[in-house]
């Protein structure tokens, strides 16, 4: 399926006192590049969200952001770890008893000890709900992004199919014209050699051989055959389920090469005019292909 590399998706979900807004936008890029901006408290989700992007976006530059709003009544509540405090005080009293040391711990010293604070159960439950909320909002934004890229891809597909049809029409004109060009070139060269024969002695067999050799130089049958093959491959890629932008771009280069060769070999005004039309059409196709994933 043809997909554009340009797209935008946004989703906003609210639950449990939190509002999460996810935004994902993509633009053209030769490879895949991801930039993700998260609030500090959601930084632990960075890798999983990047994997979500990679599932959907195979090529292009992706800029994604997550914005978090919290109701005033929701806060990161913490409470003292009373069992830990009891253990610290018991250890201090034991040290004092065994070694005769003073056990006069101040409140400030006690509060600086590790593991003395812990999140309340309600806050932990709220954090778990927030993670799920972020994942859902981000996945929703990603789906909307893909929908936009596919819609744009459908427009690109229609345009490329039409332009490919135009190229095939021009190709048919070249196929019809090519034999006349070769025969006409051979006839003109033969006539010219016969005119020269009247002035100088020329071997008839040699004249025919030379005429055939020069005529063959303007034969474009091989180029036309390869061009038709490229058209077939291009059409297949337009219906491929895999990202095909880079392969389409390569085929455009090959088509240009064949068309240029035809233009240089066939010294014929009518064929040259067709070649100019084909090159203009190929340039328009190349511009469109630059936006395909």
Image: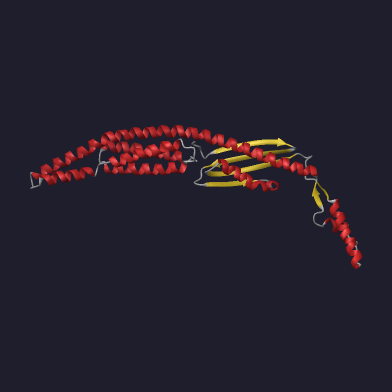
Instruction: Name the colouring of the figure.
Output: secondary structure
Depth order, front residue of 52/171: 52
Residue 284 visible in the snapshot: no
Q: Residue at x 30, y 36 (%)?
A: 273
Whole-percent x, y for residue 242 in the image = 49, 40
Q: Residue at x 54, y 45 (%)?
A: 61
* Relative to 229, 141 lies left or right: right
The relative height of residue 180 versus residue 261 in the rendered view (above or below) is above
Q: Residue at x 53, y 36 (%)?
A: 149
Q: Residue at x 56, y 36 (%)?
A: 146
Residue 192 visible in the snapshot: yes
* Relative to 57, 235 lies left or right: left
The relative height of residue 116 versus residue 250 in the rendered view (above or below) is below
* Relative to 74, 159 lies left or right: left
Q: Quadrant of residue 71?
A: top right
Whole-percent x, y for residue 136 in the image = 66, 38
Q: Quadrant of residue 174?
A: top left
Whole-percent x, y for residue 207 in the image = 13, 45
Whole-percent x, y for residue 108 in the image = 86, 57
Callout count:
0
């Amino acid at each position: 399926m043809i997909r554009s590399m340009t797209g935008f998706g946004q989703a906003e979900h609210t639950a449990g006192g939190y509002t999460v807004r996810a935004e994902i936008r993509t633009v053209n890029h030769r490879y895949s590049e991801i930039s993700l901006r998260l609030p500090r408290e959601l930084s632990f989700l960075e890798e999983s969200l990047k994997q979500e992007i990679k599932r959907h976006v195979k090529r292009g530059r992706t800029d994604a952001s997550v914005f978090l709003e919290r109701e005033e009544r929701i806060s990161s509540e913490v409470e003292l770890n009373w069992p830990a405090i009891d253990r610290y005080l018991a250890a201090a009293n034991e040290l004092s008893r065994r070694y005769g040391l003073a056990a006069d711990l101040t409140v400030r010293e006690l509060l600086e000890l590790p593991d003395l604070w812990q999140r309340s159960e309600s806050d932990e439950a709220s954090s778990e709900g927030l993670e799920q909320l972020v994942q859902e909002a981000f996945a929703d934004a990603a789906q909307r992004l893909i929908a936009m890229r596919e819609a744009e891809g459908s427009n690109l597909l229609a345009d490329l199919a039409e332009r490919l049809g135009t190229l095939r029409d021009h190709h048919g004109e070249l196929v019809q014209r090519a034999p006349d060009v070769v025969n006409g070139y051979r006839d003109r060269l033969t006539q010219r050699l016969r005119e020269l024969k009247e002035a100088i002695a020329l071997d008839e067999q040699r004249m025919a051989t030379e005429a055939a050799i020069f005529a063959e130089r303007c034969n474009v049958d091989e180029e036309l055959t390869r061009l038709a093959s490229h058209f077939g491959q291009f059409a297949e890629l337009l219906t491929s389920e895999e990202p095909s932008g880079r392969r389409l771009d390569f085929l455009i280069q090959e088509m240009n090469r064949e068309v240029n060769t035809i233009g240089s070999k066939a010294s014929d005004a009518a064929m040259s005019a067709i070649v100019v039309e084909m090159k203009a059409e190929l340039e328009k196709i190349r511009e469109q292909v630059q936006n395909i994933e």
